[in-house]
């Protein structure tokens, strides 16, 4: 099974990347190698000025493992009450209409604030819904991420940690049932 975890910001040393790496370990514990792909590596310099619909080699190479995945986990921080701009740019350079079509996807939000990226995730869900992705609805939200998340041990709150572990197990089953 080919699951990819998308760290959905280009901010260096992001919490999204730390959470993604931790979640990848949880998948590993379930016997699934879930590689992390960071939007820090999206070749933004190659699309300056707008190269929509063109065949940009670096973009195609970046997108290939994502388009070929069986399922995607988006780890999304909240920026200004929404998801980061780089995430929309990335989606706008995915092949249309193929990318996300019937693709199992799920979501983890994180933020400094009290709502754990709820707004960011729900806004991004509208986009994946438009692109006919199959949404696994047990989302996980990490509020006050700098306090509540530890890079080695995960979420300090036992209930939220259980939700995260449950999402991992159930998303594997969801992907399995939909590929
Ligand atoms: C541009 C920007 C906008 C932000 N806007 C919000 C916000 O609207 N709500 C919030 O709770 N935190 C906001 N934050 C704080 C981030 O949610 C918090 O620092 C988060 O951990 C950043 O995620 P990252 O480390 O994955 O980039 C913002 C941070 C940045 C860089």
Image (cartoon, grey):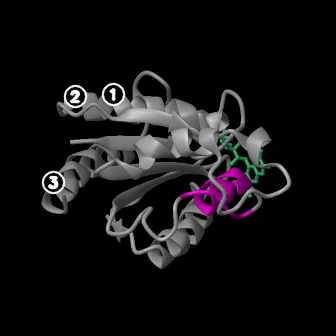
Q: Is residue 162 left or right of residue 101?
A: left
Q: Could you say whether the residue bearing mark 3 is in a helix, strand or loop?
A: helix
Q: In this view, does 158 lie above or below 166?
A: above
Which residue is depicted at the point 59% across and 70% down? 123
Which residue is under mark 3?
A: 176
In the displayed image of the protein, which residue is found farthest to the front? 55
**Residue 51: where, in percent of width, then height?**
74, 56
Q: Which of 167 and 148 is in front in this view?
A: 167
Magenta stretch: residue 87 in it? yes
Q: In this view, does 56 lie above or below 100?
A: above
Q: How far apart are marks 2 and 1 (CA)?
A: 6 Å
Q: Could you say whether the residue bearing mark 1 is in a helix, strand or loop?
A: helix
Determine whether label 2 and label 1 are within 8 Å by CB: yes
Q: Which sits earlier in the primary sequence, circle 1 or circle 3?
A: 1
Q: Could you say whether the residue bearing mark 2 is in a helix, strand or loop?
A: helix
Q: Which of 114 and 46 is in front in this view?
A: 46
Image quarter where the N terminus lies is: top left
Q: Tell me the magenta residue range.
A: 81-94
**Residue 159: where, in percent of width, then height?**
33, 47
Magenta stretch: residue 142 in it? no
Determine whether label 3 and label 2 are within 8 Å by CB: no
Q: How far apart are marks 1 and 3 (CA)?
A: 19 Å
Q: Is residue 67 left or right of residue 143?
A: left
Which residue is under mark 2?
A: 29
* Ligand 1 neighbours mark 1 (CB distance < 8 Å): no
Residue 7 visible somewhere in the drawing: no
Q: In this view, does 175 lie to the left or right of 72?
A: left
Which residue is under mark 1?
A: 25
Q: Is residue 69 left or right of residue 155?
A: left
Which residue is depicted at the point 25% across and 53% down? 171
């Amino acid at each position: 099974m080919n699951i990819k975890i998308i760290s959905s910001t280009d901010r260096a040393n992001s919490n999204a990347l730390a959470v993604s790496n931790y979640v990848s370990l949880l998948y590993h514990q379930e016997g699934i190698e879930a590689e992390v792909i960071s939007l820090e590596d999206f070749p933004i310099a190659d699309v300056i000025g707008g190269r929509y619909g063109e065949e940009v080699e670096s973009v195609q190479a970046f997108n290939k493992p994502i388009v070929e995945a069986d399922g995607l986990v988006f780890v999304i921080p909240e920026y200004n009450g929404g998801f980061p701009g780089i995430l929309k740019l990335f989606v706008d350079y995915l092949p249309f209409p193929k990318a996300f079509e019937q693709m199992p996807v799920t979501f983890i939000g994180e933020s400094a604030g009290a709502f754990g990226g709820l707004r960011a995730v729900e806004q991004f869900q509208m986009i994946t819904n438009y692109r006919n992705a199959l949404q696994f609805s047990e989302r996980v939200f990490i509020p006050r991420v700098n306090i509540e998340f530890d890079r080695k041990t995960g979420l300090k709150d036992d209930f939220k940690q259980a939700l995260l572990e449950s999402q991992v197990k159930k998303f594997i089953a969801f992907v399995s049932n939909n590929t």
